Image (spheres, rainbow, N blue to C red):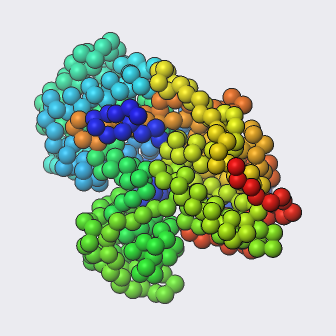
């Protein structure tokens, strides 16, 4: 195992969805008759710009993504999406306590050293070669956007003359936009010039300026590479470990309504207090959170293990006050393992992530199901965003007895590796794999191997299409950088980035269905029903 600053360099295959912080989806546009005049790309761009003016960054992101499905080559929509994503990132930083207390106050030299470290990691490890000019240019763009961001201005330029702020933005655009940078030393020189100029023009300190170059450096990379604040790095390691301190909820903000509970983790403090998906938190410790961002509300929910938090909750039971303990929450990779058809011995396993202990959990689940009469298995990775590459390999090895499972290929020799199956411990059991549009990364490694080895039927909807490997590097100043360091390939040598894997049996999505972690309803789940039909009459299970 490669070591970076005394912490392991995890090779993580992580999708776009994170455990605690979801992204609120825009309501889908209703279908229109072919006779009706459709919205144009220009009108879609106008709607997006209005959402940006209202600082509804998440809604703007979803709007632009939806519009780009119709007009994929439209430059205005493409830059609108890019602009909204970067502004959303700035907002998140300036509601992150660890950024505000640890990184924002840094001196110029300390922040420049952090930039040097990020630059070194990008140039040494990112899957594609990136020139310094592009990295610095994206930092300049990030600062230019930050100077129009209310949170950034409130924190760093309170009381500053708006005309001078606009003057500084124009200078960045006129003199520093895509300015050629030939080396790390010249990158430092450009950033130092900007620091001096910004302090002279608007009184902006160096720390916040350099941090925009630090975080903006990854804006020229892919969607899965980013600089992580200390808090987000700790969250990521907690997700990998499957343990964190909290109340055990997945929530997303709905402006004017509150924090909607998307999931309540089984056996968590929130579950024990009767909180359920669909409930809405309207206040935390008496503070109204109906107009907070998800990150702001999450900050109020955070606390030490053993403490309590008082919530005001709206739900089917009406409005109520709930006092919830904070404690260590164990996030199991497999919250459900049960027989769903006792007559035919069909078992069901729900796998929500690929963590360090996933293979051991799978062994336990399979042994339990075998003792209950399992003769075939439904493996559900719908909504599973991924996790550890090695974990995906470990669980696949339980179902495939020989041959390649997955191959990784990167820019450096240490990222090129072929993972193969071993025969001992393999379960020779008929298999149906459930996937959907949120099955990403490690889930797609599983789907690719099952397909190429003809190991079972894949049922559901096309997968997400993220076929890249991320490695995590700690930074000396705190936080870390997550970089795409390789792409992965199925046993047949295919890679399906931005394409996804199609199921063998397609099942239409039920837009009204909301599946809860730790629950399965075979009678009303069309994917499970399709899998049961496939597996009925299958042979008995054996284990090598």
Whether residue 245 sits left or right of residue 31 in the image: it is left
- Between 513 and 71, the one nearer to me in the picture: 513
Res. 192 image quadrant = top left
The image shows residue 327 at horizontal and vertical percentages of 32, 69
Res 226 quadrant in image: top left
- Can residue 12 be seen by looking at this rendering? yes
- Left or right: 209 with respect to 79? left
Residue at left offset 41%, top offset 67%:
248
Q: Is residue 332 left or right of residue 135?
A: right
Q: Quadrant of the N terminus?
A: top left
Whether residue 530 is visible to the viewer of this picture, yes or no, is no
Measuring from the top left, give residue 257's x and y in whole percent.
43, 72
Of residues 371 and 418, the one nearer the viewer is: 371
Q: Residue at x 33, y 63 (%)?
A: 245
**Above or below 161: residue 526:** below
How many numbered marks have been drawn onto this rendered protein structure?
Answer: 0
Q: As displayed, is residue 93 above or below residue 200? A: below
Vertical relation: 199 (above or below) 293:
above
Percent of width and height locating residue 397: 63, 44
What residue do we see at 79% from left, 48% from top?
Answer: 504
Q: Residue at x 29, y 42 (%)?
A: 479
Left or right for 241, reference 162? right
Q: Nearer the viewer, residue 489 or 365?
A: 365
Name the spot of residue 323 as percent of width and height, x first.
32, 81
Q: Residue furthest right?
A: 537
């Amino acid at each position: 195992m490669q070591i970076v600053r005394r912490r392991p360099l995890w090779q993580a295959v992580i999708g776009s969805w994170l455990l605690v912080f979801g992204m609120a989806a825009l309501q889908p546009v209703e279908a229109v008759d072919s006779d009706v005049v459709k919205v144009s790309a220009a009108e879609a761009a106008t709607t997006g710009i209005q959402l940006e003016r209202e600082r509804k960054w998440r809604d703007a992101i979803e709007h632009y993504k939806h519009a780009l499905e119709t007009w994929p080559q439209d430059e205005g929509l493409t830059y609108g999406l890019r602009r909204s994503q970067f502004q959303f990132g700035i907002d998140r930083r300036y509601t992150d306590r660890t950024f505000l207390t640890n990184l924002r106050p840094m001196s110029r030299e300390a922040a420049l050293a952090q930039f040097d470290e990020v630059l070194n990691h990008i140039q040494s490890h990112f899957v594609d070669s990136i020139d310094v000019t592009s990295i610095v240019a994206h930092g300049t763009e990030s600062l230019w956007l930050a100077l129009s961001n209310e949170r950034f201005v409130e924190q760093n330029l309170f009381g500053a003359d708006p005309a001078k702020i606009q003057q500084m933005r124009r200078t960045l655009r006129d003199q520093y936009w895509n300015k050629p940078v030939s080396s790390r030393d010249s990158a430092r020189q450009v950033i130092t010039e900007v620091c001096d100029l910004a302090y002279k023009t608007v009184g902006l300190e160096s720390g916040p300026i350099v941090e925009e170059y630090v975080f903006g450096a990854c804006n020229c990379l892919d969607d899965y590479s980013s600089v992580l604040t200390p808090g987000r790095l700790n969250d990521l390691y907690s997700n990998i470990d499957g343990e964190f301190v909290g109340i055990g909820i997945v929530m997303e903000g709905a402006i004017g309504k509150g924090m909607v509970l998307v999931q309540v983790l089984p056996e968590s403090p929130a579950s024990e207090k009767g909180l359920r998906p669909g409930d809405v938190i309207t206040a935390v410790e008496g503070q109204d959170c109906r107009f907070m961002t998800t990150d702001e509300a999450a900050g109020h929910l955070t606390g030490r293990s053993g403490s309590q938090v008082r919530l005001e909750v709206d739900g089917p039971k009406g409005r109520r006050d709930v006092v919830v303990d904070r404690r260590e929450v164990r996030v199991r990779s497999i919250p459900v393992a049960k027989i769903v058809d006792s007559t035919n011995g069909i078992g069901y396993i729900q796998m929500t992530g690929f963590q360090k202990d996933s293979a051991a959990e799978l062994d336990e689940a399979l042994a339990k199901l075998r003792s209950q009469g399992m003769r075939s298995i439904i493996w559900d990775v719908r909504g599973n965003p991924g996790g550890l590459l090695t974990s995906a390999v470990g669980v696949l090895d339980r179902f495939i007895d020989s041959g390649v499972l997955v191959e990784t290929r990167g820019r450096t020799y240490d990222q090129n590796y072929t993972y193969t199956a071993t025969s001992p411990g393999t379960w020779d059991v008929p298999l149906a794999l459930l996937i959907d549009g949120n099955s990403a990364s490690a889930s797609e490694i599983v789907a690719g191997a099952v397909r190429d080895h003809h190991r079972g039927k894949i049922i559901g909807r096309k997968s997400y299409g993220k076929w890249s490997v991320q490695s995590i590097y700690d930074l000396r100043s705190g936080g870390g950088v997550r970089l795409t360091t390789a792409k992965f390939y199925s046993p047949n040598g295919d890679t399906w980035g931005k394409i996804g894997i199609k199921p063998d049996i397609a099942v239409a999505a039920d837009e009204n269905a909301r599946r809860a972690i730790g629950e399965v309803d075979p009678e009303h789940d069309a994917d499970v029903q399709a899998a049961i039909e496939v597996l009925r009459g299958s042979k008995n299970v054996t284990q090598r």
